[in-house]
Amino acid sequence: MSAESTRPQAPAGGGVWREVTSGWAVIAAAFLPVALHALPNYGFSALIGPMAQGFGVEVSRIALWTLFWSFGAILCSIFAGRVVDRWGPRSVILILLPVYALVLSGMAILSVNMAVLFTFAFLTGIACTGIGSIPSGRLIADRFDAGLGTAFGLMAAGIGLAALLGPVLLQQVTDRFGWRAGYLCIAVLVLLAWPVFYGLTRRQTAGSGGTTQRPEQVSVSHLIRSRTFILMAAGTFLFGMVVTGATVNIILFLGSHGLERSEAAGFAGLFGISTIAGRMITGLALDRIPLHIAEFTAIVLTGLAACLALMSADSLAIVLLMVGLFGFAVGAEADCLSYSVVRLFGRKVYGQMYGFLGVGALLTGSGFGPLIFNSIFETTGNYADTLRIWSMVALLSAFLFLLVRKAPYAEVKPLK
């Protein structure tokens, strides 16, 4: 099969906006849980310092929180994709939103030592995955076709919003009331979101992109053995490692340039703003330009690597500019990942395939990222060398995506 298999065709006429405007409630409904599931991860940069002080340990030990969180998310992803594909995303999200709030509250109240903290980190990973991009992405995949990229971009802007507001909000709450109050704050937001999500999805119907009927069974085992999947998984793993390793440390990194915590948290909002822009602009482009999705992803990751390398500069102005561009690249690549799962592997098994790639591979990398980043920093003693090493890892990720050529779902016949 030629490389054209991975080239989505630009829709004709006004099909994109007709779908998006008629399906705004579905986009808004998907936006909410995606933003909430990302808050503990992106807001962790404001919590990691106070948590280390509270437990009296090094920052690198607290960074293990993301590893245990990733373990829980990966375990959940094994089952969540199948459950979502079988029973529907709406039911899954409605059930797990209160569970997610309960786990966050338990972590805030009951974490008396590191063992309990990491146990709740594991449970947080399980709960947040059940409301995140697997079920929310399936809501979008079932409803949109011509406007698929735009809808994914708007949905994923929820993660950008979490990256924008999370550090600032949690920094303010944590500095006043302690890190435990930060997690309680997230739990309250989750509970408030439940009735909003319920109302937005109450009358949801499938559009041109999906079907209300039970899908034919597709050989997922064939898909995950394909060369395309292996390359995507490896590249996504490295991407997750690079992004989380850098973003978790962004406030500490900006502090090394002489900024106070409140100032650093505010400037870290540049990352969130640019992430939102990256997701939305990329989504619009995917629906309008016949892009080779893998090559486009590789170009984005190369830009991300350049940003990391230049973030090692001594000039604060250059550093802040690179933080903004880094966020744009992160948003663009994340949008490509959701879109790629539908176009490369088909929408019928979106939940399972995104579970393997967007959760399994991505969060495995995310879990190890902060630990490896902080270990390199403690070895080198400076952020400049650490960021240069990180930029080389991003380039390796870009190279792996560049090798993707086939859409394997087109070669798979539905199982009888």
Image: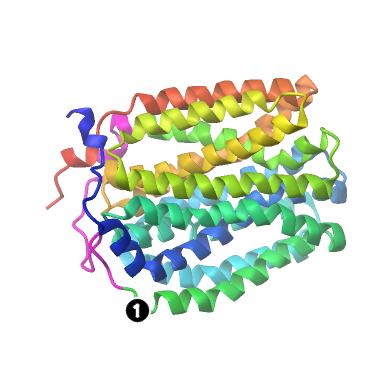
* Residue 113, placed above or below residue 243: below
- Farthest residue toward the left? 416
Q: Which residues are magenta?
A: 205-229
Instruction: Provide residue 227's location: percent of width, then percent of height.
Output: 30, 29
Q: Nearer the viewer, residue 318 or 352?
A: 318
Q: Residue furthest front?
A: 13
Q: In the visual, does 60 lie left or right of 275?
A: right
Q: Is residue 24 left or right of residue 278?
A: left
- Say how many tags the image has: 1
Q: Is residue 110 visible?
A: no
Q: Position of residue 276 (x, y in %)?
A: 54, 50
The residue identified by callout 1 is 203
Image position, residue 36 (x, y; %): 58, 61
Q: Is residue 104 magenta?
A: no
Q: Quadrant of the N terminus?
A: top left
**In this picture, residue 257 sits left or right of residue 193:** right
Q: Name which quarter of the figure residue 225 lies in.
A: top left
The quadrant in which residue 204 appears is bottom left
Can residue 185 be seen in this snapshot?
yes
Name the residue at 35% across, 79% down. 203
Position of 39 with respect to 22 (left or right) is right
Q: In this rendering, is residue 107 above or below 227?
A: below
* Residue in the image at 47% along x and 32% along y: 300
Q: Secondary structure at mark 1?
A: loop
Q: Is residue 253 above or below residue 141?
A: above
Amino acid type assigned to the residue bearing label 1 in the image: Arg
